[in-house]
Amino acid sequence: VDEWLSRIIPSTTGGGIAGSAGSVPAGTRAIMGNTKAIVRMRALARWATMYTAEKDSLGRTVEKYNDWVLVDLGDKVVGSVASPIVPITAGGVTDLYAATFGDDGMHGVSVAGKPLLQTFPPDFTRAGAVKTAEMEMGPLAMVLKNTKSAGVLRSIDVV
């Protein structure tokens, strides 16, 4: 795992305007996967005495392997069945993804000159207790400017 992570180049710029709300500090890194893979990474981090957990400003627990944040990407629901976003094969094999975030690595983009979030408030001139409003986000996309800023570790046994 350390050899794999050592080949991923950290961002040197971060993202956004430094010091402003929502900006990403340079060198922000994450290991992402499904619940089983993240549980295995947490166990590995504890075994290697490289595990830390701290609360962020919103009270959420942020777990880390060394300076890499561990992110469980969760499940998707198709019909009435939930399955991991990062799939696990019938043989119990899955993948882990790692990325460094910043303007010179992996980051999100939106259309210039257009609002990222559009709101459509309810019509308060019509009678009724229940009102319908909408919010729409986008268009947006993920960009990987440096292909060495992200990587995948394949064929991890999580049986």
Image (spheres, rainbow, N blue to C red):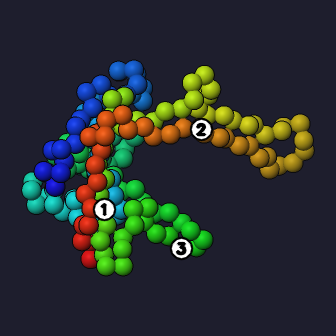
Q: Label 1: how many residues lie within 10 Å, few (<14), some (14-19) or many (20+)? A: some
Q: Return the residue at label 2.
A: 138
Q: Which mark is residue 144?
A: none
Q: Label 2: how many residues lie within 10 Å, few (<14), some (14-19) or many (20+)? A: few
Q: Return the residue at label 3.
A: 81
Gap in angstroms between the C-alphas marked 3 and 2: 27 Å
Give the quadrant of residue 45: bottom left
Q: Measured from the top left, where is residue 24 in percent x and y?
A: 35, 31
Q: Return the residue at label 1.
A: 95
**Image: 152 above or below 121:** below
Gap in angstroms between the C-alphas marked 1 and 3: 21 Å
Residue 63 appears left or right of 128 = left
Q: Amino acid at mark 1?
A: Asp
Q: Are marks 2 and 1 in contact (CB under 8 Å)?
A: no
Q: Secondary structure at mark 3?
A: strand
Q: Amino acid at mark 2?
A: Gly
